[in-house]
Amino acid sequence: MSKILFISHPEVLIDPHKPVPNWRLSPHGIDRMRAFSEGPELNTIQAIWSSGETKAIEAAGILAGALGIGLSVDRRFNEIDRSATGFLPSSVHEEVADQFFTLPETSIRGWERAVDAQERIVRAFETVMHHHPTGDIAIVGHGGVGTLLLCRLAGLPIDREYDQPFQGHYWSYSREASAIVHRWKPITERL
C-alpha cells in the first residue's frame, strides 16, 4: 500500500512579538519530532513536503535529516491566514478557531475562510500526488490545514470535531484505496 502521511508540527515557542509564521519549534517539540523520526511509520517515506512556515520547515527538516532525503516546500500548505488578527491569546484564539470551523463560508475576524483554505490545500495535495505518482510521502504542516484536508479526503463536512487534540499528530491516506487509513494519532506521547 502506498501512503501519504500528513504530519502537524509539534509544540512551538509562542512569541507575541513575532509573526506567527515565523515561530519556531520549542525544545520539547524538537524532541518529539526527533523521536517520531526514529519510528517505523517513516521507514518507507521517499519524499517530504512542507508548508513554508518556519515551524513546519524545522519539523520537516528533522525528518529529512533522519531519512537522508531532501524536502520540498509548497506555501499552499501554510496555516490558515490569520494575519488580520495576528497573535491572539490562547482562549481568544480557540474561540475564533471554533467559529472558523463552525462557519466555514464566513471570514471570522478577517481570517481566511475555511472553504477557501480547504481548496488551496487540496490543490497543493493534488500537486504533490502528481509530482510523486508512486511511493510514500510525508507532508508536514499545521493542524488546521491537516484537518481541512482530512475532511475533504474522507468526505466529511468541515468540522472541528475532526481536529487534532494538540500539536504534533499525523494521519495516513492510502493512494490505492483513495481513503483515509487512520485519523489523527500523536507522533509521540505528549510528555
Image: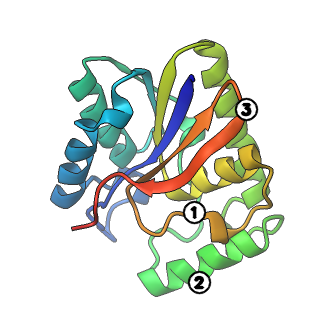
* Place of residue 23 in the rendered image (x, y in percent of width and height, measured from the top left): 33, 56
Name the mark on residue 95: 2
Left or right position of 130 against 9: right
Name the mark on residue 82: 1
| Residue at mark 3 | 178
Q: CA distance from mark 1 to mark 2?
A: 13 Å
Q: Nearer the viewer, mark 2 or mark 3?
A: 3
Q: Residue at x 59, y 51 (%)?
A: 145
Looking at the rendered structure, the secondary structure element under dot 2 is: helix
Q: CA distance from mark 2 to mark 3?
A: 33 Å
Compared with 137, 23 (above or below) is below
Q: Residue at x 73, y 59 (%)?
A: 114
Residue type at the position of mark 1: Arg
Q: CA distance from mark 3 to mark 1?
A: 31 Å
Name the mark on residue 92: none
Quarter of the picture containing the C terminus is: bottom left
Q: Nearer the viewer, mark 1 or mark 2?
A: 2
Left or right position of 141 against 186: right
Q: Looking at this view, is 62 or 82 the one in front?
A: 62
Q: Residues within 10 Å of mark 1 (few under 14, many from 20)?
A: some
* Place of residue 96 in the rendered image (x, y in percent of width and height, measured from the top left): 61, 78
Quarter of the picture containing the N terminus is: top right
Residue type at the position of mark 2: Glu
Q: Is residue 80 something one can see in this rendering?
A: no
